[in-house]
Structures are given as structure tokens and as C-alpha cells.
Amino acid sequence: MPIYCDESGGVGRGVMTLAAVSIEAEFADAVLSRFREITGLVGELKGSRIDLAERGLLFELLERGVWAATVGIAISALTPDSGQDRGDHDIAIYAQLLEDVVGAMLPAGYGCTNIFIDDGRYGPETLALVRKDIAAIVGPCGQAQMELSHRLPGLQIADVIANTFFNRAMVTPRQARMAAIVAPYLERDQIRLRILSGSAQTDDEHGEER
């Protein structure tokens, strides 16, 4: 089953989240097609552009199939070291989250698989290095590739999940609603949450360092 990865937030926002979603391409396409049919959406599905009702609808449509996700979140690790460029720090946090969530999913029975990573945020040289690092984690029987999210429904679903957890972490009037939407998935471990804190990555449920 392929894994689709997309991020939300960043150093400038105080929170960065990254979702890795294991979902069959056919099911992702069916979910997005039905979402478009109900909402009238034209163009790319973006978590930052949908309202709470539409977000709830997407998660409701996802109930009809088999999928799983791991979401990494960085909060306290977002302050750059003295003299460090903010852009470089943003990239470093992104790479840490990506490597950790993919590494956490693969040993859990996912085996050799293809990883699709959103190609829309950083420059090609940076993304090439990130892809190379993920390819090393995946091993010789899978592959990691960059793709523009508007081409793959799986990436668009990953974007919504990452954005939902970004908003769940931010103190806003929508925070409680975001938490309520994802609570059932966290409770049954369909979505696993990992927290980046300093140099240690911890599982949100068990608090175990990696």
C-alpha cells in the first residue's frame, strides 16, 4: 500500500505537522471524487481552504475504507539555534518529521512500498536530498518520489490530515472542533501521533523516546 506524505505549518507559525497516510490509490481517488460530488469542489483539495463541515465530511468518507496514518508534530523544537538561518531550520524540522513518520510506519507491517512526497514547498535540490534520505529508509524494494499534490488524491488527503492536526495544536476557536474530528481515529490507533521535542521523538500515547 503506498504512503502519501504532506506537511502543514512551519517555523514561522510555531507548529509544523507532517502526515504520512497509507491508503490505496483507488480508494483515495474514490473518496476525493465523492467529496467533489457532494461539495462541488473544483481544483485541488487543500486543508487550509475547507470549512469544518467539509473537513468532517472527508473524514466521514474515509470511514468506508482501509487506511492508516502517522502524524508527526513539532512544537518546542521549532526555535532555531543562535545564528541558524530560519529557512534552514524549517527544512531540518521538515526532514526530521518526514524521516521519523515514514520510519515509524514501515516496520509496522507495511514492508516494501512506494512513498509519495509533496513537491510543492521546498526547492528541487533540497527535495532531492530529502527523497534520497527517504529512499534509504524504504530500501531497495520500494521507492520514494516527489509529486505535485494536485496530481494525487492521496497527497491531498494527507494535506487535510496534516492541516487538521496543525489546527488541533493551535490555540484558536476551532481547536476543540479539530480535536473532536480526529479523536475517534486516535482512540483506535488508525492515526498515530508522534511528538518532536528537542532531539527526541516520542510516541504521544506512550511517551517512549526513539
Image (tube, helix red, strand yellow):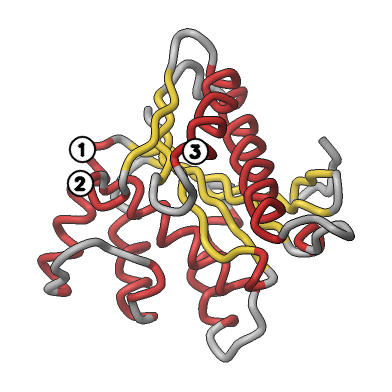
For this rendering, which residue is in front, 7 or 177?
Answer: 7
Rendered location of residue 167, percent (x, y): 56, 74
On the image, which quarter does residue 32 sit in? bottom left
- Is residue 84 found left or right of 126 in the rendered image? right
Distance (Cα) linking label 1 and label 3: 26 Å
Residue highlighted by disc 3: 127
Q: Residues within 10 Å of mark 3 (few under 14, many from 20)?
A: many
Q: Give the label on residue 26, or none.
A: 1
For this rendering, which residue is in front, 19 or 31?
Answer: 19
- Circle 2/circle 3 CB separation < 8 Å: no
Distance (Cα) linking label 1 and label 2: 5 Å
Rendered location of residue 181, percent (x, y): 48, 70
Residue at position x 52%, y 50% in the image = 19
Q: Name the element at disc 3.
A: helix
For this rendering, which residue is in front, 190 or 153?
Answer: 153
On the image, which quarter does residue 144 sit in? top left
Residue highlighted by disc 2: 29
Distance (Cα) linking label 2 and label 3: 25 Å
* Marks 1 and 3, the one that precedes in the sequence: 1
* Marks 2 and 3, the one that precedes in the sequence: 2
The amino acid sitting under disc 2 is: Asp
- Is residue 182 found left or right of 33 in the rendered image? right
Nearest-to-viewer mark from 1 and 3: 3
Q: Is residue 17 above or below residue 106?
A: below
Q: Quadrant of the C terminus?
A: top right
Rendered location of residue 163, percent (x, y): 49, 65
Rendered location of residue 154, percent (x, y): 32, 45
Residue at position x 56%, y 34% in the image = 130
Q: Residue furthest top?
A: 140
